[in-house]
């Protein structure tokens, strides 16, 4: 893969990841984690290794307020845990 292709892929997947966290309402929850750096890096690498970018972009384009990430999302587990943690925190308030 050429250098420009690599940079383009990184940029594309970073955009998809940011869109996904925004769609799921998890951007702040992710940012507020105590270990956000390592968690974010692992999540970014999972996203970058995904070969479903086209499907992901289309999914993001048609979903308004999805409950969960799509089944093929490599960060679905992370997003589910963040959603559960978010719900628990609001329940305790």
Image (cartoon, rainbow, N blue to C red):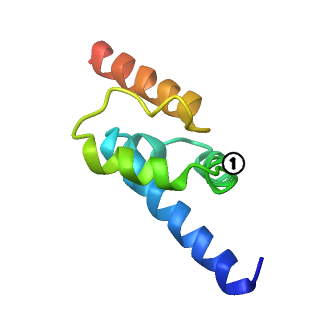
In this orientation, does residue 20 appear? yes
The quadrant in which residue 48 appears is bottom right
The answer to whether residue 19 is left or right of residue 62 is right
Which residue is labeled 1 in the image?
Answer: 42
Q: Position of residue 7 (x, y in %)?
A: 63, 78
- In this rendering, is residue 47 above or below 3? above
The quadrant in which residue 92 appears is top left
Q: Quadrant of the C terminus?
A: top left
Nearer-the-camera pick, 56 or 18: 56
Residue at 45% x, 63% y is 15
Residue at 29% x, 51% y is 61
Q: Position of residue 77 (x, y in %)?
A: 58, 28
- In this rendering, is residue 22 above or below 71? below
Q: Position of residue 53 (x, y in %)?
A: 53, 54
In this orientation, does residue 27 appear? no
The answer to whether residue 58 is left or right of residue 36 is left
**Residue sticking out furthest to the right:** 1
Q: Quadrant of the N terminus?
A: bottom right
Q: Secondary structure at mark 1?
A: helix
Number of marks drawn = 1
**Residue sticking out furthest to the left:** 64
Residue at 44% x, 34% y is 69
Residue at 41% x, 54% y is 57
Tag 1: Cα neighbours inside 10 Å, few (<14), some, or many (≥20)?
A: few
Nearer-the-camera pick, 42 or 9: 9
């Amino acid at each position: 893969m050429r250098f420009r292709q690599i940079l383009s892929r990184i940029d594309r997947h970073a955009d998809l990841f940011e869109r996904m966290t925004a769609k799921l309402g998890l951007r702040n929850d992710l940012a507020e984690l105590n270990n956000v750096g390592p968690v974010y890096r692992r999540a970014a690498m999972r996203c970058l290794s995904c070969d479903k970018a086209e499907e992901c972009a289309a999914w993001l384009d048609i979903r308004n307020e999805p409950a969960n990430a799509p089944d093929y999302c490599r960060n679905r587990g992370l997003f589910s845990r963040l959603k559960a943690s978010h719900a628990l925190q609001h329940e305790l308030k």
